[in-house]
């Protein structure tokens, strides 16, 4: 058995060795075939590269031959183009000369029309110097814009143009001479007007130099005086110009008189402004005093003092210059402060009345209780004590005063005249039943 196993192993080893040898032979064969293929491909590639190099060399020779041919043809074409351009330039020059000649003859009607138009302007009776000068410039410019006339008619047209230009110049010069004469006449009229304006300005200047301010109603008079002075200044400006030799002396007098007049007005205005500031200060002190009363501890005394300040305001406001809007604003502050003081007094009075009402209602409750239960002791003394305490208390709200007094009188009457007690006689007590007593107590408590 061991021998067979060894034999089997030996056979496996031999078989594996043979398989490895066969594999090595196959690999060697494959490498050989691959090397042969690579060598063949390299030979084919070298052959293809040599063929391409030969083709490129042939193409280069062909290209050089074609370039030489093209250069020759280009030189020949350039010579032909130069010849053609020379012919074309010659033809264009001839055509241009012909067109110029045609244009000159075509423009001949325009030259003639310009000359005819100039003749119409010259013959128009409404043509003045300005129109003649303007048309002369237009004629020259339009003639140049048309260019040269035909050579055959050039001399004739130039002579006609010079004739019209000369006549237009004559009209313009005549108009200028007339204008100079009219200017001299206008200067004479202007001088006469200046002399008249001079007399008028001297009269205005005399009024300004005599200017004075009235003493009555300084505020209003100051305003009216300023308006009058402004009216004189406006009349001075409207008077117009004066002869040049009189301008500076007249202006100096006018300025001096004007400065003096306005100085008087400014002085009056400064005086009024000082008085206005003093009045404003007085009124402001009154207003500040009134505003200081708003938080006074004694509302009644503050209200009396506010009345005094209002009277003082009236006396201070009556004299001196008015304050306009400032016075209205100060018076609004005074009115607001006074209203606040009077409101505090009314509030304090109402508060006092409400306290007095509570005290009197308490007295009424005690009096009504005494009337219901019996005063005990001396009824008259009890009533006197109630009435004395009632009078010491002071005012209550007016709408409740009558009701309180009626209740007090009723209570005092019942204390002085109590109802009869019939219960001790063994009879019914119809009189002791008082259905309105509770109602009166409820009314007293509610009020």
Image (spheres, grey):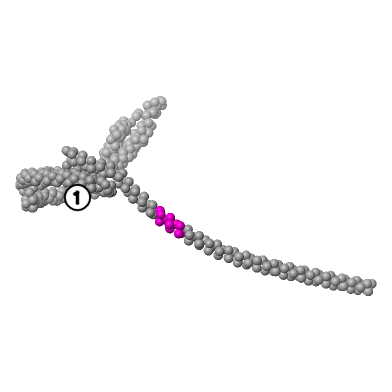
Residue placed at 9% from the left, 50% from the top?
258
- Examine the structure image and report whether residue 227 is included in the region drawn in magenta: no
- Of 25 and 436, the residue lying toward us: 25
- Of 249 and 440, the residue lying toward us: 249
Does the image show residue 372? no
Look at the image and tell me in which quarter the C terminus lies.
top left
Q: Is residue 130 left or right of residue 418?
A: left
Look at the image and tell me in which quarter the N terminus lies.
bottom right
x and y percentages locating residue 205 in the rendered image:
6, 47
Does the image show residue 266? yes
Residue placed at 28% from the left, 38% from the top?
396
What stretch of residues is rendered in magenta?
Answer: 78-88
Give the quadrant of residue 107: top left
Q: Is residue 111 left or right of residue 444?
A: left
x and y percentages locating residue 287 in the rendered image:
21, 47
Residue, disc 1: 285
- Of 361 and 266, the residue lying toward us: 266
- Of 17 and 443, the residue lying toward us: 17
Residue placed at 23% from the left, 43% from the top?
115
């Amino acid at each position: 058995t061991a021998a067979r196993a060894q034999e089997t192993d030996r056979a496996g080893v031999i078989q594996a060795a043979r398989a490895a040898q066969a594999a090595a032979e196959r690999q060697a064969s494959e490498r050989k075939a691959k090397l042969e293929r690579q060598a063949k491909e390299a030979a084919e590639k070298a052959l293809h590269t040599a063929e391409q190099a030969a083709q490129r060399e042939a193409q280069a020779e062909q290209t050089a031959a074609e370039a030489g041919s093209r250069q020759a043809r280009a030189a020949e074409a350039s010579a032909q183009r130069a010849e053609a351009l020379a012919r074309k330039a010659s033809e264009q020059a001839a055509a241009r000369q012909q067109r110029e000649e045609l244009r000159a003859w075509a423009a001949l009607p325009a030259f003639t029309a310009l000359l005819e138009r100039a003749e119409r302007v010259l013959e128009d009776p409404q043509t003045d110097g300005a129109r003649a000068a303007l048309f002369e410039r237009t004629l020259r410019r339009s003639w140049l814009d048309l260019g040269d006339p035909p050579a055959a008619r050039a001399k004739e047209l130039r002579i006609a143009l010079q004739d019209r230009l000369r006549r237009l110049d004559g009209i313009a010069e005549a108009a200028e001479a007339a204008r100079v004469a009219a200017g001299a006449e206008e200067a004479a009229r202007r001088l006469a007007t200046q002399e008249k304006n001079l007399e008028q300005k001297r009269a205005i200047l005399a009024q300004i130099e005599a200017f004075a301010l009235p003493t009555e109603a300084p505020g209003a008079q100051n305003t009216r005086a300023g308006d009058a002075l402004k009216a004189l200044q406006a009349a001075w400006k409207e008077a117009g110009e004066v002869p040049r030799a009189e301008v500076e002396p007249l202006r100096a007098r006018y300025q001096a008189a004007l400065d003096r007049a306005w100085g008087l007005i400014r002085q009056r205005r400064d005086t009024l402004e000082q008085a206005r500031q003093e009045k404003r200060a007085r009124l402001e002190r009154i207003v500040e005093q009134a505003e200081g009363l708003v938080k006074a501890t004694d509302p009644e005394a503050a209200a009396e003092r506010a009345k005094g300040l209002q009277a003082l305001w009236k006396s201070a406001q009556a004299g001196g210059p008015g304050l306009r809007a400032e016075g209205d604003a100060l018076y609004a502050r005074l009115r607001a402060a006074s209203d606040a003081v009077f409101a505090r007094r009314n509030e304090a009075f109402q508060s006092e009345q409400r306290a007095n009402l509570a005290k009197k209602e308490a007295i009424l409750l005690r009096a009504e209780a005494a009337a219901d239960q019996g005063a005990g002791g001396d009824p008259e003394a009890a009533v006197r004590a109630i009435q004395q305490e009632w009078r010491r208390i002071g005012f209550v709200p007016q709408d409740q005063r009558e009701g309180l007094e009626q209740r007090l009188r009723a209570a005092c009457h019942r204390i002085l005249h109590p109802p009869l007690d019939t219960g001790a006689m063994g009879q019914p007590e119809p009189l002791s039943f008082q259905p309105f007593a509770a109602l009166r107590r409820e009314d007293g408590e509610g009020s």
